[in-house]
Amino acid sequence: MVKLLSDAIASVITAFDHTMDTVLDFQTEEYQCLPAGLTLIEGIGRQLVGKVPTPVIVEADTAAQRDIDTASALMRGMGLDEGDMIENPCIFDPTFAGEGCGFCEELDVGSQKAAVEERWNSFPMSEKVVDLIDEFQARLGVGEAPPFGEIEDNVDSGSGYYSGGTSVASQIIEYILMEMGGNTTSWGWGQFSRDDVYRFLEAHIYYREVQDRALPLNLRSHSYMSSEILATLGSGVEGTRVLVGHDSELDALASIFGLEWSTPPFPRNATTPGSGIRFDVNGEGEVSVSLHYQAFDGTDDVLFADAAFTWSGGREAVGIEELKEYLGGKLSDECMP
């Protein structure tokens, strides 16, 4: 079995000129895990004991401290020795020049821009998301910068990133989710209920589905990880291999493996902090994929949901040889060691 776990609730700082309100001080270094987030991850670890095959091996993206902290919290919860954590940053980003990686050349900005534009054009925003962003702006009030709807969406030629009003709204929605998951006494300046946050998250997910599911970029960054997942599933060795990285990893694997899911109370295809995607193979060689996640509802309860293979009629299990054939010539050989 292979499980990819995204990092814990973390502090984020975003562009708050777009709201009349001031920003909460998380009292945590920017982009590092909040204490409450790590407590939730420990809870995941405790609840996974007895529910995953043993032995359990944990590999982390040690290029990021928050991933090390997340992996440590998971191992504490599972009763594992944190000293056994395996440092493996290259499997998470083979284009990263440090830590002995960089064997896969990153696409130039022009190619990145073209890939994101192609994804954006093939995945237009629904009227529901348009209305959600407008409602979100109305609830926030207007700050010094223009409203989201007046900032034209584009793919930035300098960075290759999907930018504009949707991007800014996405960042602020993510910030409020971090507040809620971070167990603060209130979130979104006291203006939003939990159900509001769940609902507005659909706009954040739309942004991620454009920016983080552009297949040409995913194949550069995650062919190595995908090939390792296939190799582990086909090895016949009993146990669980846990990879601790980022939420973008879940998006990339969904793109490459052709997956979709529903994780209530979140909108479809959510990749929330601390959630994990799990690949299992049974004795007949059938591969199934599931999600585990927490609802940030004041408990550490772990919820589970099955994923579906979109290219196979929405089936929840496919043969491993069928899966290998689907991935076929997609994976980038030059992005593997």
Image (cartoon, rainbow, N blue to C red):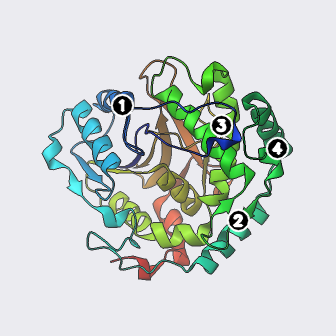
Q: Residues within 10 Å of mark 2 (few under 14, many from 20)?
A: some
Q: In the structure shown, which secondary structural element does the residue marked by tag 3 occupy?
A: helix
Q: Foreground residue, 14 or 242?
A: 14
| Tag 3: amino acid | Leu
Marks 1 and 3, how far apart in space?
Answer: 22 Å
Q: Foreground residue, 282 or 240?
A: 240
Q: Nearer the viewer, mark 4 or mark 2?
A: 4
Q: Is tag 3's residue or tag 2's residue first in the polypeptide sequence?
A: 2
Marks 3 and 2, how far apart in space?
Answer: 20 Å
Marks 4 and 2, how far apart in space?
Answer: 18 Å
Residue at the spot of label 4: 130
Q: Residues within 10 Å of mark 1 (few under 14, many from 20)?
A: many
Marks 2 and 1, how far apart in space?
Answer: 33 Å
Residue at the spot of label 1: 44
Q: In the structure shown, which secondary structural element does the residue marked by tag 2 occupy?
A: helix
| Tag 4: amino acid | Val
Q: Quadrant of the C terminus?
A: bottom left
The residue drawn where x is 52% and y is 63% is 323
| Tag 1: amino acid | Ile
The residue drawn where x is 67% and y is 21% is 191
**Residue 201: which numbered mark, if any?**
3
Q: In the structure shown, which secondary structural element does the residue marked by tag 1 occupy?
A: helix
| Tag 2: amino acid | Arg
The reply to whether the C-beta atoms of the residues labelled 1 and 3 are less than 8 Å apart is no
